[in-house]
Image (cartoon, rainbow, N blue to C red):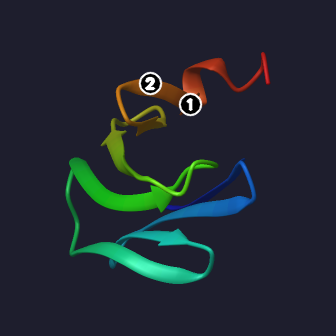
Amino acid sequence: MHDIWKLKYGSHSIQIENKLTGKRLYVDGVLQDEEVGLHLSSRLFGKVKNEEGEFEDIKVSIGCSLLKTVCRVFIGERLVYSTDLQWDM
């Protein structure tokens, strides 16, 4: 299992890595959170500056089942990415 999701938020790039050895959240190439080891579900947290210069919270939820891996990214209280909706993007 090895998944990488990349998305843009304003001028920022967000990358989530899901590997057997752990999960990582990067913002603009800087590691913001990491969970080591194999887990069926994970939460990663970070921060990103919005266009007004204020920090917004990032929350990443990753869930694994036998059939697929689901990743959801929230910035503030808003869902900005979901593997369930990627066909719409």
User: Residue 61: x percent and y percent?
Assistant: 33, 41
Check the image and name the residue furthest to the front: 52
60 up-or-down from 13: above or below? above
Q: Is residue 17 left or right of residue 10?
A: left
Residue type pointed to by label 2: Arg
Tag count in the figure?
2
User: Residue 10: x percent and y percent?
Assistant: 72, 49
Toward the viewer: 77 or 2?
Answer: 77
Q: How far apart are the two marked residues, 2 and 1, measured between alpha carbons?
A: 6 Å
Q: Secondary structure at mark 2?
A: strand
Q: Residues within 10 Å of mark 2 (few under 14, many from 20)?
A: few
The quarter of the picture where residue 82 lies is top right
Q: Residues within 10 Å of mark 1 (few under 14, many from 20)?
A: some
Q: Quadrant of the C terminus?
A: top right
Q: Residue at x 56, y 50 (%)?
A: 50
Q: Secondary structure at mark 1?
A: strand
Say which residue label 2 marks.
Answer: 78
24 up-or-down from 56: above or below? below
Q: Is residue 36 left or right of residue 89?
A: left
User: Residue 63: x percent and y percent?
Assistant: 32, 39
Q: Which mark is residue 72?
A: none
Q: Residue at x 28, y 57 (%)?
A: 45
Residue type pointed to by label 1: Val
Q: Residue at x 37, y 35 (%)?
A: 76
Toward the viewer: 11 or 67?
Answer: 11
Say which residue label 1 marks.
Answer: 80
User: Residue 30: x percent and y percent?
Assistant: 51, 83
